[in-house]
Amino acid sequence: MRAAKIHPIKQNGRGAREGNLVNAREGLVNPRIFVDPEIYRQEQERIFTRTWLYVAHESEIPQSGDFVTRTMGEDGVIVARGTDGKVRVFLNACRHRGMPVCREDMGKTSSFMCGYHGWRFSISGELIGVPFFEGYQGKLDKESLGLHQAPCVDSYHGLIFANWDPDGETLSDYLGEMRWTLDLLFGRTEALEVVGPPMRWTVDTNWKLPAANFGGDGTHLFTTHGFRWDLGLEGKQPGRRAGYRMITPNGHTASLSGFLDGDLCLALPKELRPEMESRLTREQLEMMKSLLIIVGNVFPNMSFLNSGQHTPGEWGGAEGEAVSFLTLRQWQPRGPDRMEVWSWCFVDKNASAQWKEASRQCYLRIFGMAGVFEQDDMENWVEISRALRGPVASRLWLQYKLGLGSVSHEPRPVPALRSLEHSGFSEESERAFYSHWEKLITQA
Ligand code: FES
Ligand code: FE
């Protein structure tokens, strides 16, 4: 079967133009971007080898010799802390014949030995052992055959990212104003820590559907997760709704919401307030007071969700205490219609043991692998992928028009953050995500 070209699409709907995969100005997305194998291959080349990708949290590899195995797109990598304390990211492929040199999810070691012919690499990546080395008679240059290393590795609030592109921007510039939101999640207290290894499971859908959803799909709540209203679990609203949207030039998107005039701070325990007050700016603290939920996506595939429950005690916290959870997840591409979900639960290191356990329970019940919201969402994305495989379905443009042309409000306190007080629901974040995706995938 001939692979489809990346650009061609016939005009099948009003406003759609030949050659567009995404038409953000008119709120249209070509369904083939979710199913076409050639587009998928281009994504791997042009997005997953050129952008900063999340690979691990510092708390997962605190000591020299600690490592975890992860993926950057389809490429398997080892994230290891060397004897010098430095974190390096290696392609998990032996330089002899390409066999993964590390088959474990995590561990501690001083070297990695390939299980095929026994080449050995140090924790810093050098090739330090080759069986039958004399037989190469000087023709094997061990110095140049260390594990292939990502040239750019950096971290922000303990979140370690890597980038294969040596000419790209710094991590700080790449994250841009999304750092302001990440401060509220990962920089609010002395440190956050990962609770156990990530949950991992495979889902038959395209990675972009959840990434865009987490960036700002607010309207699906009332139908997809409508059981909360049907069963009367929503409780009484404690005030006027507060809502903010963040969209950055690099395709990072977030939605921050809660209630004005509140003292909510994401339903975090009160004893963490002094830490927050010393670490966050006045504007960040002010906004934190009105927030119960922060959800978003760091382009391309790292999403986060901090959700507070304003019904006291509902999720197993102490009597009269609200509970929240923080999850970070990656939508790891494994084909046009397949992904692996990697989901971590985070807690503030200085919270009480009781609160940490309540937060973990809250995560498990709502957004763990079998959590109620997680199940609701996955059903949608699996069914969309199944439906779009059909030749007729794949010709009909998908609609992302909500809020098109709405008046933009004064940004505050950083340019990428806007209040939604007057504009209400919108698909602006999804348009921004797909627009940036198209920009990258059509660049040579
Ligand atoms: Fe690794 Fe041969 S493939 S030693
Ligand atoms: Fe959802």
Image (spheres, helix red, strand yellow):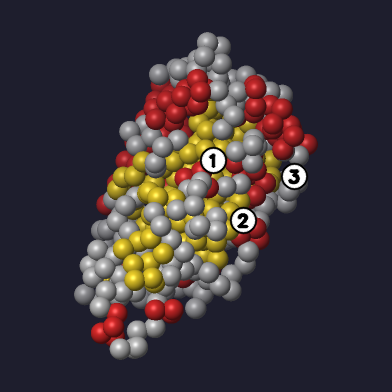
Q: Is residue 99 above or below residue 359?
A: below
Q: Secondary structure at mark 2?
A: helix
Asked if ligand 2 lies within 8 A of label 1, the reply is no
Residue 329, quarter of picture:
top left
The numbered mark, 1 or 2, whose residue comes first in the sequence reads: 2
Q: Left or right of 306: which side holds 100?
A: left
Q: Left or right of 181: which side holds 147?
A: left
**Residue at label 2?**
175
In the foreground, 94 or 271? 94
Quadrant of the frame with the N terminus: bottom left
Choose mark 2 or mark 3, whichever is in front.
2
Q: CA distance from mark 1 to mark 2?
A: 16 Å
**Residue at label 3?**
412
Q: Amino acid at mark 3?
A: Arg
In this view, the residue farthest toward the right is 282
* Crowd class of label 1 (few under 14; some 14 to 19; many from 20; radius 10 Å): many
**Residue at label 1?**
295
In the foreground, 275 or 116? 116
Q: CA distance from mark 3 to mark 1?
A: 18 Å
The numbered mark, 2 or 3, whose residue comes first in the sequence reads: 2
Whether label 2 touches label 3, CB < 8 Å: no
Residue pictured at 24% horizontal, 63% vertical: 115
Q: CA distance from mark 2 to mark 3?
A: 18 Å
Q: Amino acid at mark 1?
A: Val
In this view, the residue farthest toward the front is 134
Residue pictured at 34% horizontal, 74% vertical: 95
| Picture disc at residue 186 | none
Any part of residue 218 in sight: no
Q: Is residue 28 above or below residue 290?
A: below
Residue 423, quarter of picture:
top right
